[in-house]
Image (cartoon, helix red, strand yellow):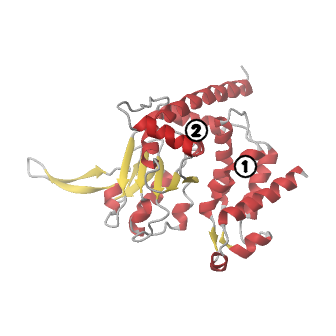
Amino acid sequence: MSEGAALLDEIERLEARLADARTQIARRFIGQESVVDLSLTALLCGGHALLVGLPGLGKTMLVDTLGRVMGLDTGRVQFTPDLMPADILGSEVLETGADGSRAFRFIEGPVFCQLLMADEINRASPRTQSALLQAMQEGEVTVAGQHRPLGRPFHVLATQNPLEQEGTYPLPEAQLDRFLVQIDVDYPDRDTERAILLATTGTVQGRAEAVFTAPELVAAQATLRRMPVGEQVVDLILDLVRACRPGSGAGAVNDAVAWGPGPRAAQALMLAVRARALLRGQLAPSVEDVAALARPVLIHRMALSFAARARGEDLAAIIDGVVTSLTRAEAA
C-alpha cells in the first residue's frame, strides 16, 4: 500500500471513531453540537480550549464526559482568589525518615494529569494564573529548579463566566494566546432544553463509554498533522491572520483593533481546519472550514481599542467582516 493510500485509510478509520465518540458524548451532553465539535477540535490538535458561558450550561459535565470518552486521566482545579501556584503545580515537603534522616519529597499537584479542568480560571490572581503558562506551552513544569513532565497528551479546558466580573482578574494576553480556541457556550434551543429535561430528571442517567485511549489520541493527533492542506486554504489562513492585525491596511481593523493575532494564531487555525474536516468526514480542509473557525481561533487573540469600545463596536463582527471580504476576493 502506498503512503498516500495508507494515510487515506488512517483518516477514514479516524473519522469513523470520531463519529462514535460524538455519539457517546451526546449520551450525557445533549445538543450543543458546535461546542462539542470545537472541544474535540482542541483535543485533536493537541491544544487547549477556553469555554465561556453562564453557570448551569453544562461546561463541567462536558469536560468530564470528554475525559471519559477520550480515555484521559482528568484533574480539576477550582480557581479562587486565595489559590496559590503550589495548589496547582505541587510542592516539596521535608520528611523525616525512621532513622532520623531528612529529605525533600515532591507531592504532585492536580496539573499532573492528561486533561485538566481549570474551573473559573479568571478568579485566581495573575500570579496563580501564570503557573499554567509553562504547562500549557511546553507540557512540563519547573518546580524547585527541576523540570517535571506532565501527562501525555496534556490538555487544559478552562471555564470562565462572562457576567460575574467582581473579584476576577482578566487573563493576560500571553495566556489567552495559549488557548487554541475560545468556545462560547450559549443557552440551548427549546427542543434541546426539552431533551435535557427528560434525560436528566429521571431515574436513569445517560452514561458515556470510552472510545479512545490516551495513546490512541496521541496517534490521532499525529495523523491529523499529516492531513494535506491545499495552497488556497494556506493562503487564506495567512491572509486572514495578517488582515486582523492593526496596520494591515484593512480600514475596520486599523480603526478598531488595539492588538491582533500573532503567528501562533495561524498555527492554531492550520491545525483546527484539519480537525474540522475530520469531524465532517472530509479528506482535506476547505475554505469553508477556515471561515467557520475564524472567530473561535482569533477572537481571544485580539482586543478592541478604547475608542472602538466607546463606540460600541463588536470584535466578532469585525472578524466576520474580514472573513467575508477575503472569501469574496477568493471567489472573484
Q: CA distance from mark 2 to mark 1?
A: 19 Å
Q: Is residue 326 positioned above or below 166 on the image?
A: above
Identify the element where label 2 is drawn.
Answer: helix
Residues at discs 2 and 1 in contact (Cβ within 8 Å):
no
- Element under label 1? helix
Residue at screen point 54% across, 61% down: 176
- Left or right relative to 181: residue 281: right
> The disc labelled 1 sits on which kind of residue?
Val
The residue that label 2 is drawn on is 221
Q: Please indicate, yes or no, whether residue 36 appears anywhere in the rendered image.
A: no
Q: Amino acid at mark 2?
A: Gln
Residue at position x 73%, y 41% in the image: 285
Judged from this view, the residue extending furthest toward the right is 332
* Residue 90 position in % (x across, y down): 31, 55
Q: Which residue is mark 1?
A: 290
**Quadrant in which the N terminus appears:** top right
